[in-house]
Image (spheres, grey):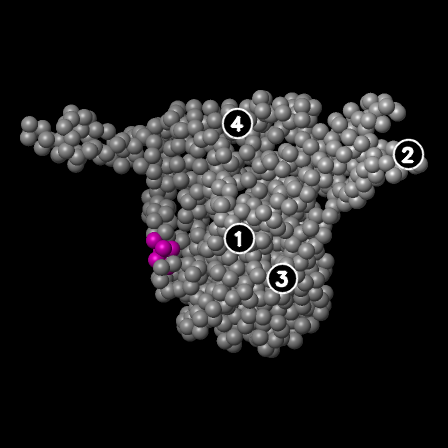
Amino acid sequence: MQGLVPAATDGNMATEFHNLQELRHSASLANKVFIQRDYSEGTTCRFQTKFPSELESRIERTLFEDTVKTLNNYYAEAEKIGGQSYLEGCLACATAYLIFLCMETRYEKVLKKIAKYIQEQNEKIYAPRGLLITDPIERGMRVIEISIYEDRGSSGSSSGSSSVSGSTAR
Amino acid sequence: MPGFSGGGVGGGVGGPASAPPRPFRPSRYVPVSAATTFLVGATTLFFCFTCPWLSVYFSSVIPIYIAVIFLFTLANFCMATFMDPGVFPRAEEDEDKEDDFRAPLYKTVEIKGIQVRMKWCSTCRFYRPPRCSHCSVCDNCVEDFDHHCPWVNNCIGRRNYRYFFLFLLSLTTHIMNVFGFGLVYVLHHRQQLDTPHAAVTMAVMCVAGLFFVPVAGLTGFHIVLVARGRTTNEQVTGKFRGGVNPFTNGCWRNISHVLCSSQAPRYMGRWRSPQAVEVQPPFLRPPLTEAQLEAKVLDNGIQNDRHSTRSKSSLDQMESQSADAEPPPPPKPELRYPGLPRADTEESSLLTEAPPTPSMYKYRPTYSSPGRNHTALSHPNKMIRGESLDSPSPSILQSSRQPSYRSEPSSLDGATVVGGGVGVRRGGGERGEGPGGPGGTAVGMSGGMSGHSLTGRSYTSYPSSLVLSTGGSRSSSLRSAHTAHNPLATLQSEGTTDTSYKSLANQTPRNGSLSYDSLLTPSESPEFESAAHELSPQKPRALFPSTTLTGQPEVVSPGSPLQGYTSPFLSAQIAQQREGQLLQGSATFSSPHRAYLRAVSPPPFSSSGPPEIQHLLHHNHDPSSRAFRNPSSSSSSPGARSLEPPVSPPPRGLSLGKSQSYIGEAGPQYKPRPTGGGTVLSGGGAGGGQQAPQSTSRPALANHTTSKPGGGVKKVTGVGGTTYEISV
């Protein structure tokens, strides 16, 4: 849905806009690839770095693997059991868990970082290649969903003709 | 569990976005209200009547200490009650669009060297991650599912297990405090026991004393669980009894994981930030390497075709199949092969790597004549449909529902398990599975047919005929299994079974019918229904014609309570061992199946007997029906069976019991499959080592055989006084 150029409306008056739209290509969702979780080390959150075949012709292998590895590192950091998480737990107990109303947990903080990272990756790397990564948290952290878009070519031909007729009519 | 009580007033809670509104069930709130009342009421009385004297006589520190502990208990109680346990949102449509009819019911992953099965959840539409389970009361899949606690009226899962555990600890401490200080008061007022203060104190002491025993028991139980890194679900279903727990990191790490890890995030009700990134062509493309160019040339575009066919044609096919009763045309090659591992992509991408034809042969039993299927169609069709509607059918379904369909072994087992497949995915018991079940029986009935069907994978034998017969029946899987998928008619049934698995499962009503759920995964049911369910197998089995063949009504041995969940955690070693046994016995293509069947068949007969008895029973029925019974392979099967842990006791991983619950037929056999049997089967059939572990994990399916819906409900008291309803 993103990035789709709205179809030109018929019979509009603004022929100039239609002409411009003719030049724009539209992208439509062609397929989705799902990167599964890697459970080889237990239930800690990790995604498989195996390069899916559907992306063979769409993106370089190294870019993809970098993305997944960075995500894995983020999740490992979120789930790390260390001083900070322990103190957080103690503080929560001491305040009868009321602290959760005002404070953000460590995991949530890392999730925000992940969301930003994914956004940035999408903008810089994936969208220019017609791909889009969906944050795994939206899928219950079970898969990383990568949407593959296809170039549908120019969509302005029909509108162009109408606009042309419109313009000629005028 | 009150949760099972049917329908109440419809104004159900909306629940998460993806879940349908559930009817309001007031009986669900009785235990939690009682618990709250007792806790708050008794403590308040204690504070009012006993504490003033204590603060005067000893010091005011005592009431403060008791108050602090009480508040801590209350806080943990509220968190355990109101916190989302880790519910997974329902998967979206596109996550499994293509695999519906060919997807195996189980996918196997390896965790620290141990094979773990991930089951397809038909309600939530994804393969359940390890340790995830579907709660039938809440109708949600919960991450790291522990159990459904009626006292807090909530599931206990990854996010709130810590609070539940601390609640138990603090409640035990609180009860001891109240009882102890109440005793001090009473002992100091022995002469004034008729005063209201003393009377109230004694009453509070009684309540405290009464609750102390179950609460302390439950607390001790959970302390052990935390130390061992297990969930209640795993403990009760005996998953790790015979094997190794892959989820443990050592006692200290387990404890720190429970108590010190950061609060896990919730998946439901998250605010989705709108995607701000626009995708616009023209798109960059990576430069193709030489190898890739070459591959493209040689590829003949098959790879690309697969994508398109998979996404579009398969869908069309599925739709058409579900629409009419006629067997669908053979599916495209890439569509029919379900067995390949789909680890890399979600269900949508098929197993592009597997060459369809050779693997089909490899995994599918020889299905002799398509004609058979057709003949069976008319008859079984009726049976199946009829059966599916009745309660008995569930048993058949269950039996046929072999857990199978794991990704790799599934090719071997799953594919063939037409009948099994039917049962496998929670097809909603009677509904989806019906066709598979009765069909299987129908197959069994027809002598030659039975032999044929049985030979292949135990699953398929039934399913193929069943599937075919059910044909138009609801499960599209059946249909596809029947003919569509394989160009090879014989193998077709098997192939279709796979589909039947997922599609059948998906046919289950989305209300999370307990019956089916509990059937399939008793262990998953929050109240440990699995234990009970396993017992129930008896029911449906009778339907299965195969039983007639075997001459024995099948029953899931009630003796093995925890069949539902044979532990999928079988070490690879054992699996391979079993596989080796299988391979010995099966020389021919079909023989592995036979061996598989064989291993499976005994269970149906002897619900609770030890493997030897089963074996004897098994042989008794040999002449009757199993054409596929192969004397040579039989030897391997007993051996395989003997590997199984005793059936009666709660199944350990590969519970034999499961297989037992399975009615005699080949189809059902898949399910129960004792772990050994499962391994054997898989090994034999697939000829590949990997199958073995997976097949063993399948036994869990046996649980499914227990039919639940409408069955009697037995109340079982668990640790800590928690009661569980087990359908019998």
- Image depth: mark 4 or mark 3 in front: 3
- Which residue is most to the front? B195
- Image depth: mark 1 or mark 4 in front: 1
Q: Which residues are magenta?
A: B316-321
Q: Are marks 3 and 1 on the same chain?
A: yes
Disc 4 target residue:
A111
Distance, label 2 to label 1, CA atoms, is 52 Å
Q: Would residue B389 appear left or right of B175 to someone viewing this image?
A: left
Label 2 is placed on what type of residue?
A: His
Give me the residue at 51% from left, 42% from top.
B13
Disc 3 target residue:
B712
Distance, label 4 to label 2, CA atoms, is 59 Å
Q: Are marks 4 and 2 on the same chain?
A: no
Disc 2 target residue:
B189
Distance, label 1 to label 4, CA atoms, is 39 Å
The crowd level at tag 2 (other Cα within 10 Å; few <14, some 14-19, many 20+) is some
- Image depth: mark 2 or mark 3 in front: 2
**Chain to which the residue tagged by mark 4 belongs:** A
Give me the residue at 67% from left, 23% from top.
A95
- Which quarter of the figure has residue B210? top right
Q: Are marks 2 and 1 on the same chain?
A: yes
- Image depth: mark 3 or mark 1 in front: 1
